[in-house]
Image (cartoon, rainbow, N blue to C red):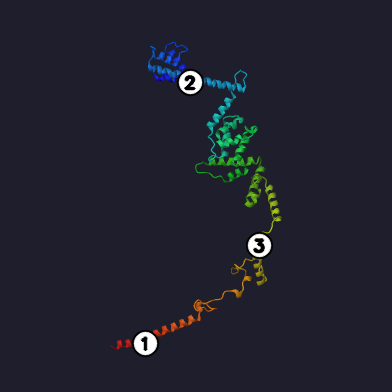
Amino acid sequence: MTFLAKGKKCDLIALTTEMGEEPSPDMNIMGLKALITGSQSYEEEFVKGMLDTIISSRKEEAEKEEKKFQLEKMRIEAGMATPNGNLVDERQVHYNSRIEMSKAMPKFDAKESDIVLYMSLFERQAKRLKIDPSDWVSCLILLMPTEIVELIARVPEEEFFNFEFIKGILMKKFKLNAEGFRQKFVQHQRTPEKSWKDFVYEVTNYFQGWINDLNITDFDRLKNLFITDQVKKRVPQEVRDHFVDVWGTIAKPQDPADKLDGYECVRKTNRKPANLNPKVQQQRNVRSNTYSRDNGDHNVNQKPMKQEKGFPRSQYDRKDRPKFTCYSCGGERHVKKFCPKLVKTNSDQDNRRKANVLRTVVDQEPATKKTQGG
């Protein structure tokens, strides 16, 4: 009988009535329990099933009443009515649009998804589902991660529902201006898991984003854009850095030509000689004077020879050079290899060796004769 505890008082009153009993309105839960269990038609399993049915019916009715209340509230707030007198629930239409878009589009992943392709697909799906453009931002917010939603929340109120304005903010967030689209258009590669149709679609979107950002609407502007791009490729990187703020927005070939000519003109005018360290400059002057003195037609700018590295030649003095000293006898002006004493000693040793050889040969001759005579 513990199953009776899961029902409310109204459920027990309804159950008692269904069993043919007549409960009083002021009867408490314990009295209702006694009335139910004491009834002649009481069967535990049957009564348990009836109570579950009564509880389910009550909950369904409560949900219907809540939905009806919310619907009526939105109708009153909308304040719109048709000629037939039926109120149009505008909020319900917006809600359905957002639900349909969330089913048709996956959520945006900032690490894996490409914002250009994602926004292009979003616009196509919104048009296919016939969603009003004023609801596009509301649908987009449901598909974005928290950090991007916070970025959109900072938009001024008058631009909050302007989809093109929000789209521009997202492109700036992912650094996709005209130059960013151009780089993706030029450098994009096809991956093995994608088909060539996917690759063509992606490249087309990058190209479209490039020309749209520069407002290229006719053939002449497109021609100028490609000529300008070829001019930009020939400009050294150190020169590009001086125009980095406007480099991506230049779309006419005459514009970079004027800027680059002006830059080179100013650079030549303001060019200054390099400031060298005073010690280095003094050393260079000493070397230059030395070369000019030694050789009248010597080029001052010529690199010094190997023997001139280190101290300048003018700083050398033959009197100050170290004298040769023999390690054997201690004499000056010769080294050990050419020492006279060592040469004499070596000669005596050679003479002794020769004498020993001759003596040995002389001693061997009588022995040889005796052997032959025997």
Q: Secondary structure at mark 2?
A: helix
Q: Is residue 208 visible?
A: no
In this view, 366 is above or below 49: below
Give the crowd class for mark 2: few <14, some 14-19, many >=20 residues within 10 Å. few
Amino acid residing under circle 3: Pro
Residue 59 - label:
2
Label count reads 3
Mark found first going from the N terminus, 1 or 2: 2
Corner quadrant of residue 161:
top right
- Which x, y percent locates residue 176? 60, 42
SS for dot 1: helix
Dot 2 or dot 3, earlier in sequence: 2
Can the viewer see residue 196 in this picture? Answer: yes
Which residue is labeled 3 in the image?
A: 278
Residue 267, image x, y percentages: 69, 54
Please name the residue shown 37% across and 87% down the image: 362
